[in-house]
Image: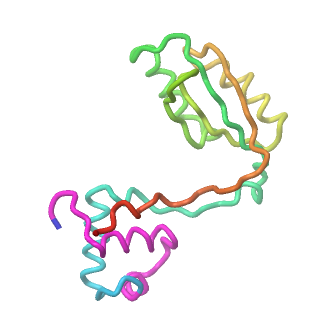
Amino acid sequence: MGGDTLDRYHIAILAELQRDARLSNAELSARIGLSTAPTWRRVRWLEEQGFITGYRAEIDRRKIGLGVLAFVRLDADRNTGASTKPLEDAIRQLPEVISCHYISGAGTFELQVLATDLDAFSRFTIDILLNLPNVKDVHTSFSLGEVKASGGVPLAHLQQP
């Protein structure tokens, strides 16, 4: 297991842990067809190499009162490294922002923002987003319903021929 080489067992481990990260090592071993000791070593290696970056529970946002999912395109006033760094740092500190990406085309960042309701989202936009450093403009679209969310990353391209 040197370098970034993944074999069929590594790929199977990744697939199984994406489906259920709570599997015991014994259950994982049985599912991938490898004994427990080599399975444990492979999981540790995947973690150490950064293929597995963490484990967490998926929470239904609606069940905990976060009924609004907004997609926010945030335009920076200036798009230079020095001017966007304070904005990036500020965005990282906002728990309402569950993801943020640099985007191509119009805008600088695309954010996914959760809020309890439209009033709370409006207050968040006016009080927080519009006052972040280097923000020029904010454009928002709202999710009307999820077709697919929280899916694992595709692994088919890793399969050995």
| Image height of 124 relative to 6, above or below | above
Task: Identify the residue shown where x is 65% and y is 57%.
Answer: 148
Relative to 117, 111 lies left or right: left
Residue 66 belongs to magenta span:
no
Q: Is residue 60 above or below residue 13?
A: above
Left or right, 14 with reference to 67: left
| Residue 138 location, quadrant | top right
Residue 92 position in % (x across, y down): 52, 35
Which color scheme did the rendering employ for the protein? rainbow
Q: Residue at x 78, y 28 (%)?
A: 123
In the image, what residue occupies the spot 37% across and 74% down? 12
Q: Main secondary structure of the magenta part?
A: helix
93 to the left or right of 129: left
Give whichever of 161, 119 is nearer the camera.
161
* Residue 157: % across, % down: 37, 60
**Which quadrant is the C terminus positioned in?**
bottom left
- Farthest top residue in view: 78
Instruction: Give percent across and percent down for residue 136.
Output: 62, 13
Q: How many marks?
A: 0
Q: Residue furthest left?
A: 2
Q: In this picture, which residue range is highlighted in magenta?
A: 2-30
Quarter where residue 59 is shown: bottom right
Q: Is residue 60 above or below residue 8?
A: above
Residue at the spot x=39%, y=18% of the render? 81
Look at the image and tell me in which quarter the N terminus lies.
Answer: bottom left
